[in-house]
Image (spheres, grey):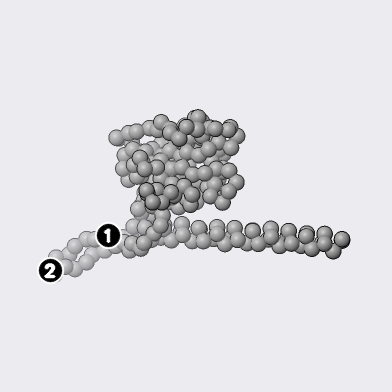
Amino acid sequence: MKRIGILLIIGAITMIAFYFVYQMSINKKVEEEVNNYIEETSIEEKINIENGDDVVEENKTEQKEINYTAIIEIPKINLKRGVVDSTKNFSSINYAISIDKNSNYPNENGNFILYAHSGNSNIAYFRNLNKVNKNDSIYIYYSGVKYEYKITNKYTIEKTGTANVISSKDKKYLTLITCSQEQKNKQIILVGNLTNEKEY
């Protein structure tokens, strides 16, 4: 009987160790993908290319096929992940942080709207979003530019499948949406204003 107990403990420890190693390998892979995106989309110095007798200025960027549309970084909760678009054949919410189909991208005036799961699952990328507060910074890396947003508003709404968000033709906003873990049938909304943008 004592041997069975010891074997069960050893088995449990082995499974826990395997889970942590597996999680570490996934996190390492995601970190590599994020770094690859940033490296591959960075804007390099302009170079001169000779075209017959004329000299033409051209941006030198090598574009490889990338799964991510952009990268989000939230230092307050130690989050740096890729974000992707949903399509009619691909529900990105089940794999990554998703871009709402009504979004304007960071290089356009309007609202860049992102949503993800909260909770305890492997795809709960916004599980700690409730810890982000007003005046915290959030960064979006998109097409060679790093956009900095400051959180200006944080509130909850009923979980109905829709949310009213800011629409603007002359300013840039960021909106993050996830389910509240503290309040059942509620969603957390964070709104940020663009404060800075620079090439990386």
Question: Where residue 53 is drawn, which disc sits there?
Answer: 2
Question: Where residue 110 is drawn, which disc sits there?
Answer: none
- Residue drawn at x 55%, y 36% is 180
Looking at the image, residue 3 sits to the left or right of residue 134; the answer is: right
Q: At label 1, which amino acid type do we have?
A: Asn
Counting the numbered discs, the total is 2
- Residue drawn at x 38%, y 51% is 89
- Residue drawn at x 49%, y 61% is 32
Mark 1 crowdedness (10 Å alpha carbons): few <14, some 14-19, many ≥20: few
Mark 2 crowdedness (10 Å alpha carbons): few <14, some 14-19, many ≥20: few
What percent of the width, then of the height, locates residue 35?
A: 46, 59
Q: Quadrant of residue 39?
A: bottom left
Q: At label 2, which amino acid type do we have?
A: Asp
Q: Earlier in the sequence, mark 2 or mark 1?
A: 2
Q: Quadrant of residue 193?
A: top left
* Residue on which the image places disc 1: 59
What percent of the width, then of the height, locates residue 148?
A: 42, 44
The one of 111 and 185 positioned closer to us in this rendering: 185
Q: State whether residue 114 is above or below residue 1.
A: above
- Position of the N terminus, as image quadrant, is bottom right
The one of 154 and 88 positioned closer to us in this rendering: 88
Q: Label 2: state its secondary structure.
A: loop
Q: State whether residue 147 is above or below residue 16.
A: above
What percent of the width, then of the height, locates residue 41?
A: 36, 58
Residue 196 appears in the rendering:
no
